[in-house]
Image (cartoon, grey):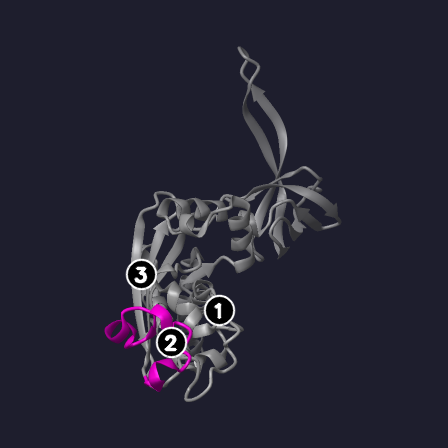
Amino acid sequence: MRGRLIVTLAAILACLPAAAQNQAKKRVAVLDFDYSTVHGYISAIFGTDYDVGRGVADMLVDRLVKSGRYSVIERKALDKVLAEQNFSNSDRADSTTAAKIGRILGVDAIILGSITQFGRDDQVKSFGGLGAVTGRWGLGGFGKRKAKAVVQLSARVIDTTTAEILAVASGKGESKRSGTTLLGSGGGSGGYGSGNVDMSSTNFAATLIGEAVNKAVDEIAAQLDAQADKLPTRKVKIEGLVADVSGNTLILNVGTRAGVKVGDTLEIRRLAREVKDPATGRVIRRITQKVGEVTITEADEISSVGTFSGAATPKVGDMVRNSP
């Protein structure tokens, strides 16, 4: 009996760090990395103007999600906000604009990044620029000279309320191997000449440049994980209405854009009366009463579905908010 008790307590204690980590997750969004500094090298490597900034951002998101320290806004939601706000790439690199994007998304912080080196280890030392031979650089040019791939990244974490820089990180990756092309492990370009690139794929990771990118992203992610506690945790304020009632199933007019997540429990409240200023007739307070609670089972950007529990019967138009 005593042995069983010790095992049970050990199992509970082993679970406590994971539970605590879950509660402490920071909600962030990762913007595409700026690659204007290395823009001239991209076409020479990939054969087209490939958006490596987006590729690096997606790779970083994967690392942060897997680490468990962050809750990261999905790409679709981020793209929609950027399209609606019509922010240019240069605007997004500005801390104040980034903070505004973060507030719209309802995140604790937003991560900005830059790609400061992307190519061969001899590109600056030996050539200083692409000049007239850009069509051959990275695709086996320069007299078939072998070189390693080098990628350098920097990132900063922006407070969405103050636009203050909360944390910084940098990463540099270098391929262990060298070759005449950065898109292969020995010969050929691996079919990347047309810009058909998936930077998160194992095929890309096997290339020289892919090896360097992965190492640099790993360094950035590890540093951001170590600094997660520097980020403030803000309670997302959810306010919405019941849009549909079908038995105990409710549809709400708020979704992931408002911070609603599957598993959340929200209060359902109903207006009981309004208190008016006797001098002006203006409503100065609304008194509500609790109808019950709804546990979210599905959520998209603008709506959510949940199961109702409570003594009263919910109605369309009832208010929805966070549980206190």
Residue highlighted by disc 3: 227
- At label 1, which amino acid type do we have? Thr
Front-lying residue, 85 or 237: 85
Q: Is residue 67 visible?
A: no
Residue highlighted by disc 2: 137
**Of the residues tagged 3 and 1, which is closer to the observer?**
1
Badge 1: how crowded within 10 Å, few (<14), some, or many (20+)? some
In 3D space, how far apart are the residues under numbered discs 2 and 3 (Cα atoms)?
Answer: 38 Å
Q: Which residue lies furthest to the front in this view?
A: 132
In 3D space, how far apart are the residues under numbered discs 3 and 1 (Cα atoms)?
Answer: 36 Å
Indicate the secondary structure of the residue bearing disc 1.
loop
Residue highlighted by disc 1: 48
- At label 2, which amino acid type do we have? Trp
Asked if labels 1 and 3 touch by Cβ distance under 8 angstroms, the answer is no
Badge 3: how crowded within 10 Å, few (<14), some, or many (20+)? some
- Residue beneath the point at 43% across and 44% down: 100
Q: Which residue lies furthest to the left in this view?
A: 125
